[in-house]
Amino acid sequence: MAASLRLGCQGIVRTLVAGLRVRGPDCGLRALHRSGIWRGAPSVQVFMPALSPTMEEGNIVKWLKKEGEVVNAGDALCEIETDKAVVTMDSSDDGILAKIMVEEGSKNIRLGSLIALMVDEGEDWKQVEIPKPTVTPLPTTPPSAAPVEVPRPTIQPPPAKLGLRMSPAARHIVETHGLDPKVIVPSGPRGIITKEDVLRVLAEKKEIAHTPVQITPISKPEKIPPTPQAAVPSIGSQRPSIPPVSIPGKPNAAGTFSEIPTSNIRKVIAKRLTESKSTIPHSYASTDCDLGAVLRLRKELAKENIKVSVNDFIIKATAMTLKQMPDVNVTWNGEGSSPLESIDISIAVATNRGLITPIIKQAANKGIQQIAESAKVLAQKARDGKLLPDEYQGGSFSISNLGMFGITGFSAVINPPQSCILAVGRSRTELALAEDEEGNPQILQKQLMNVTLSSDGRLVNDELASQFLECFRTNLENPVRCALV
């Protein structure tokens, strides 16, 4: 047995030596290495995908496959939190999940980042070949070329790079007058240099420049004991720019604060709200709608075990109004209005991650029962974070209903590039004087609901907005004619 093993090893060595002698140095051991026998299994790289048009980075919420599990095309790999919702990422290839490069709970993963490695079936997934990170080489100059000194203008770095905190107005004055921000004593909250701080230093500088110089006769210098120089006020001598962060699990100490991480959804909400209020001229118009006919129809439908809400009637009335007034069903394309062919109603749903607006598509062509079923399914998927990208992207008109929270009326912010959003408040009971069939006066109770239309003044002027609200009120107060298509 030992003799046979020794002969076999000698044969392998002789073969390799022969390869070196006959075929040169690129054969033998090097050829054996290059053939892939000594390498790991070739990998299929999985990158962070773009799961929404506005997505720039994502968070890995949960891996649905473990290392070593077989993955078929179409299988769910992991759950990724985008800027809109938590979306399931499906595999596009067959193979074995060999290596998870980004663990669960990782946040702010840029698009195109490597998150996992797969190998083909039959390969040893434990020996997967992990790609080396690409390093961009630094540009080098040839030794023969002498360095040529090119005079460059000295550019003073902006104050923000010095680690100082200052308001935009203060930064502008510092850059304009070339002041040294290190000598400015901040008086704002958390050590922020305010505009008044900079103006005070600028005034002192001008006062020193205009002070007349007094000429005194030269006298014999006397020995004066050295006096300590006045300490230049610095940022470090003041209170810290940012208070210390409290330690989790321990009671907050005085002067500390707790930092709450911001989800991608809330970052996008903040960005779009700022964009909407700063770039869209909002116009507002309100009216009251009588819900008497809607409440009576709901009771009749409930007898047939058809459950619909008042909000479903509002969605249907809005869709029918947009169908009757196509000039409102437009979006802003950057230069003007773009008419929309379909009527897709976005409904605002509050979740623990922020506000999201799933879309009921082709709402004008659906009956009230279909709208109720679609709204219920979409709202639940939004709260669970299971909305697909095509279920919340787009939309031509938004509805935000806060009536269930006891809000009488409010004004909503337009969701760009849409032209309008309808804010719905709660219903209230009011007494109204009316006449019966014989013309006698009588007092009736009415269920009134306040709605406020926020419209883009560039697309929907005040006259068109008033006509829209009048048509909407007529459709809502006569639900029978628009409940069924």
Image (cartoon, rainbow, N blue to C red):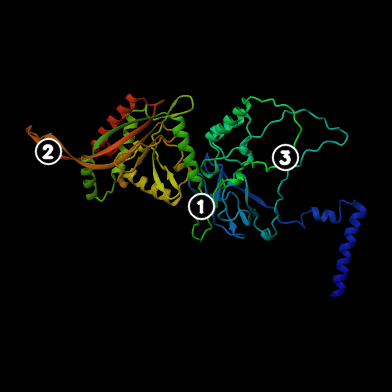
- Residue 443: assigned label: 2
In this view, 114 is above or below 327: below
Sooner in the amino-acid sequence: mark 2 or mark 3: 3
- Crowd tier of the residue under label 1, counting other residues whose Cα lies within 10 Å: few below 14, some 14–19, many 20 or above: few
Q: Which element type, helix, strand or loop, lies under badge 3?
A: loop
In this view, 207 is above or below 93: above
Q: Residue at x 68, y 60 (%)?
A: 126
Badge nearest the viewer, 3 or 1:
3
Cβ atoms under marks 1 and 2 closer than 8 Å: no
Cβ atoms under marks 3 and 1 closer than 8 Å: no
- The residue singled out by tag 3 in the image is 224
Q: Separation of disc 3 and disc 1 at Cα?
A: 46 Å
Instruction: Give whichever of 62, 482 is nearer the camera.
Output: 62
Badge nearest the viewer, 1 or 2:
1
Q: Separation of disc 1 and disc 2 at Cα?
A: 61 Å
- The residue singled out by tag 1 in the image is 255
Badge nearest the viewer, 2 or 3:
3
Q: Which element type, helix, strand or loop, lies under badge 2?
A: strand
**Kind of residue at badge 1:** Gly
Q: Is residue 224 left or right of residue 317?
A: right
